Image: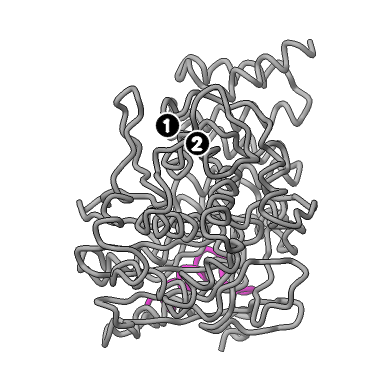
């Protein structure tokens, strides 16, 4: 069927063909017989729509599974299909697991969240100000974040938690604890050190005995690169030319407690339910962990003790954590009032990935109808650049936007992405046309002028680059990127 359609497309006007394709896809949408059927269809369509290797997603209500499913491949080179038991890197969701371990020890009376961490970890030197465990949990400790390629491209192996703490132990604090929010994955190594010193167990053994086993997470592991982990997914990325490639090699021993745990979608849902069921920590302890952080200035930060905590656009309270690591993206969302746990796992980091967990939860709560995943129009337009003129492609973009396409994403972000894709291909004239169109549609759109500045600079036209960066500052005087680019150009001149 599809081969015949593509033969037909050579004879028909391309725009007309894609409108026909839109109608066909619309007519094949799943009949809403059950929530499970709708979620299953979404997951099945997702890898192709987003051009990603695989997706695993699930949702439960009142500790009962509504849907868990997967689609695509966890290894593209060997065509290994994704299943609900495939093991994905959780990235920063790992912080929530480490936080729960700390809270367990707090419940047991073995530590005080407001004590200086050096009381428990003797090898961590005292700083100018006390650094409490609480401040580490909520990222207001002043302990530094990553520098350069430490986060995504680390290849140094740290043999234990202690060595990963020594890596940053002698660095000065970035600010007085409690005065600023500075998201720091490195600092969670110090929490793992607290767990080891207080419990007398290795971090790995503690979380297995006290979190993974009680929650029934049989496929949860520290993501050691050299270990054989059954059903482990390979990570992928797209380069500047939007071509799929293997993710960069990353040794996660630098960040196990803050970003290096791996598990399946089944086990991630189990972890969420174990929190709701008070299997891991008491309800009062969880409630205290979900309170937003208050800085010394009185400013409120929507992050608690190892959990994002906020209200959605409909006013519903939820908590959880998102993750984005080398070759992986994840999200865990928990609605405590509705007893809903939703999560998804991807073995790629990319743009325009939507949020299946959030969309599933809203659908189950009756807040929004679940639309099928949309294709990024920017990616499709890029395939036309050697076939059609830029004017024709942009006219096609306008046509889809006016039709409110249910097949493609057609917003301003798509046009911006397309402009930068052209820039990566060094098609400067075409990129200028795209960013100019953005400005024509909104003369106050900073991203349009930045895009023009970046394009002219790459085309070695510093004068026009400087002019557009200066236009940015007339609209947004505090734009740090524009300031930095202007300074760089002026120094070279």
Seen from the viewer's position, the closer of residues 152 and 71 is 152
How many residues crowd around disc 2 within 10 Å: few (fewer than 14), some, or many (20 or more)?
Answer: many
Q: Which residue is mark 2?
A: 438
Q: Residue at x 58, y 63 (%)?
A: 201
Would you say the residues marked 2 and 1 are in contact, meaning their CB atoms lie under 8 Å apart? yes
**Predominant SS along the magenta part:** helix
Q: Is residue 172 left or right of residue 444?
A: right
Q: Quadrant of the C terminus?
A: top right
- Residue 259, percent across and down? 58, 56
Q: Residue at x 70, y 83 (%)?
A: 79
Quarter of the image where one finds residue 261? bottom right
**Which range is magenta?**
9-26
Q: CA distance from mark 2 to mark 1?
A: 6 Å
Q: Is residue 434 left or right of residue 369?
A: right
- Residue 251, percent across and down? 74, 57
Residue 352 visible in this rendered orientation of the protein: no
Up-down relation of residue 304 to residue 55 (above or below): above
Q: Which residue is mark 1?
A: 442
Residue 40 visible in this rendered orientation of the protein: yes
Q: Which mark is residue 367?
A: none
Q: Secondary structure at mark 1?
A: loop
Seen from the viewer's position, the closer of residues 483 and 24 is 483
Q: Residue at x 59, y 51 (%)?
A: 193
Q: For residue 110: magenta?
A: no
């Amino acid at each position: 069927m599809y081969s015949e359609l593509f033969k037909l497309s050579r004879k028909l006007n391309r725009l007309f063909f894609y409108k026909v394709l839109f109608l066909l896809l619309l007519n094949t949408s799943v009949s809403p017989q059950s929530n499970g059927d709708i979620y299953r269809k979404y997951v099945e369509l997702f890898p192709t729509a987003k051009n990603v290797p695989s997706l695993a997603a699930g949702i439960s209500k009142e500790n009962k599974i509504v849907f868990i499913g997967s689609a695509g491949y966890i290894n593209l080179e060997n065509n290994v299909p994704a299943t609900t038991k495939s093991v994905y890197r959780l990235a920063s969701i790992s912080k929530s697991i480490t936080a729960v371990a700390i809270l367990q020890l707090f419940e047991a009376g073995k530590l005080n969240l407001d004590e200086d961490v050096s009381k428990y970890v003797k090898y961590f030197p005292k700083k100018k100000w006390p650094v409490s465990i609480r401040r580490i949990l909520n990222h207001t400790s002043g302990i530094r974040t990553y520098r350069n390629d430490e986060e995504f491209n680390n290849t140094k192996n740290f043999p234990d938690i202690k060595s990963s703490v020594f890596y940053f132990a002698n660095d000065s604090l970035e600010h007085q604890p409690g005065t600023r929010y500075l998201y720091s994955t490195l600092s969670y190594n110090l929490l793992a050190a607290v767990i080891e010193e207080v419990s007398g167990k290795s971090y790995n053994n503690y979380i297995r005995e006290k979190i993974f086993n009680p929650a029934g997470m049989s496929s949860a592991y520290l993501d050691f690169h050299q270990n054989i982990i059954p059903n482990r997914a390979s990570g992928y990325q797209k380069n500047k030319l939007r071509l799929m490639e293997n993710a960069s090699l990353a040794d996660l021993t630098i960040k196990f407690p803050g970003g290096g745990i791996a598990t399946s979608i089944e086990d991630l849902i189990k972890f969420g339910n174990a929190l709701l069921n008070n299997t891991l920590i008491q309800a009062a302890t969880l409630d205290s962990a979900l309170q937003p952080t208050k800085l010394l200035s009185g400013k409120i930060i929507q992050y608690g003790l190892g959990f994002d905590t906020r209200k959605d656009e409909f006013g519903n309270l939820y908590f959880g954590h998102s993750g984005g690591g080398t070759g992986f993206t994840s999200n865990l969302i928990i609605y405590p009032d509705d007893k809903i746990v939703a999560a998804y796992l991807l073995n790629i980091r990319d743009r325009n990935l939507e949020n299946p967990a959030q969309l599933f939860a809203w659908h189950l709560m009756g807040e929004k109808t679940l639309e099928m995943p949309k294709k990024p129009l920017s990616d499709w337009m890029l395939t036309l650049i050697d076939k059609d003129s830029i004017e024709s492609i942009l006219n096609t973009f306008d046509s889809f936007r006016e039709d409110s396409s249910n097949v493609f994403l057609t917003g301003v972000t798509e046009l911006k992405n397309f402009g930068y894709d052209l820039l990566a291909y060094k098609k400067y004239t075409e990129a200028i046309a795209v960013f100019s169109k953005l400005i024509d549609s909104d003369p106050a759109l900073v991203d349009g002028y930045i895009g023009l500045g970046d394009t002219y600079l790459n085309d070695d036209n510093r004068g026009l680059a400087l002019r557009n960066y200066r236009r940015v500052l007339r609209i947004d005087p505090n734009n740090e990127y524009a300031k930095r680019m202007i300074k760089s150009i002026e120094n070279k001149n």
